Image (spheres, rainbow, N blue to C red):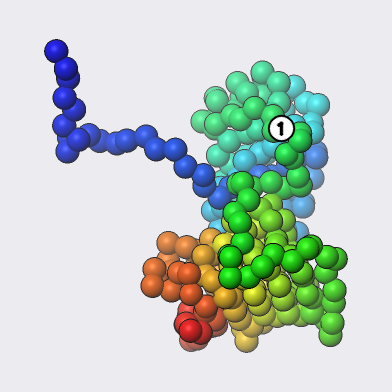
Amino acid sequence: MSLKVDRASMAFTFKGGMLPMTVMELASADPERIREQLSGKLSQSPAFFQHTPVVLSVEKLDEPHLALERICAVCRAHKLLPVAVRGGPDPVKQSAWALGLGWFPPNDGARARTLEGVSTVEPSPAVPEPSPEPASTASGGRIYRGTVRSGQQVTAPDGDLVVIGAVNAGAEVLAAGSVHVYGALRGRALAGIHGDTLAGIFCRELRAELLSVAGNYKRLEDIDPQLLGTSVQVKLCDAQLGITSLS
């Protein structure tokens, strides 16, 4: 006898998916050292610290009895939300579960790279991907040629940032001035990180996880769906972040 399931009465379904996720790779198990560095990062890019989910990677630590609860408290005090732990011996795994966190096995070393996020998203076919080159600076600004890949952060602390390529999901670009992306913007873009309200964000294809100008921000779910995939400019207007089409 077959059992028919009434889908209308189902409370949920399980679906696989790849979500943008920032990995916080710990090089120290000292909560105070972590607190000090997070405080400095917060002053540099406050919009990033807006309840961003993170995975705590402890693969580089030789600490079987990690002060995981204190480390998580430090993260939450800086508006980061630990959701899981990656790596570590069995006591670390048990601590993660006891704190209501997920646990991932150590990452495949052959695919590891600094501050990983999700798997790389290919750049827009409308913009051929150039070979990555060292970034150059001009008049306090910075030009980055190539794709900014998941987990990377590219910064122009003294002027505008120009990215000749795409910004993948899980990547972050920051500038004291404006951010220009000549490709798909799928990651996070923060302009006016020192408070310049005249800064803006300009991109050829908008798919951003987060946009911020002088500390005012919008997440992907706050963006008008009609603007997604189009060329836009992002500017402050009456202390509100406005997004207008350049098409």
- Which residue is drawn at the image coordinates 25% and 35% (left, top)? 11
Residue 101 location in percent, x, y? Answer: 54, 32
Is residue 104 placed above or below 52 in the rendered structure? above
**Image quadrant assignment for residue 159:** bottom right
Residue 122 seen in the current view: yes
Front residue (pair 90, 73): 90
Residue 49 seen in the current view: no
- Which residue is drawn at the image coordinates 59% and 29% (left, top)? 103
Q: Secondary structure at mark 1?
A: loop
Is residue 90 placed above or below 158 in the rendered structure? above
Residue 139 location in percent, x, y? Answer: 84, 85
- Which residue is drawn at the image coordinates 16% and 17% (left, top)? 2
The N terminus, quarter of image: top left
Q: Residue furthest left?
A: 1
* Count of picture labels: 1
Residue 222 location in percent, x, y? Answer: 42, 66
Residue 65 location in percent, x, y? Answer: 73, 23
Front residue (pair 88, 141): 141
**Image quadrant assignment for residue 174:** bottom right
Is residue 110 placed above or below 116 in the rendered structure? above
**Image quadrant assignment for residue 66:** top right
- Which residue is drawn at the image coordinates 17% and 38% (left, top)? 8
Looking at the picture, which amino acid does disc 1 mark?
Asp
Front residue (pair 237, 245): 245
Front residue (pair 49, 6): 6
Report whether 244 appears left or right of 50.
left
Q: Residue furthest top?
A: 1
Crowdedness of circle 1 by 10 Å Cα count: few (<14), some, many (20+)? few
Find disc 1 in the rendering and name its residue.
108
Report whether 35 appears left or right of 69.
right
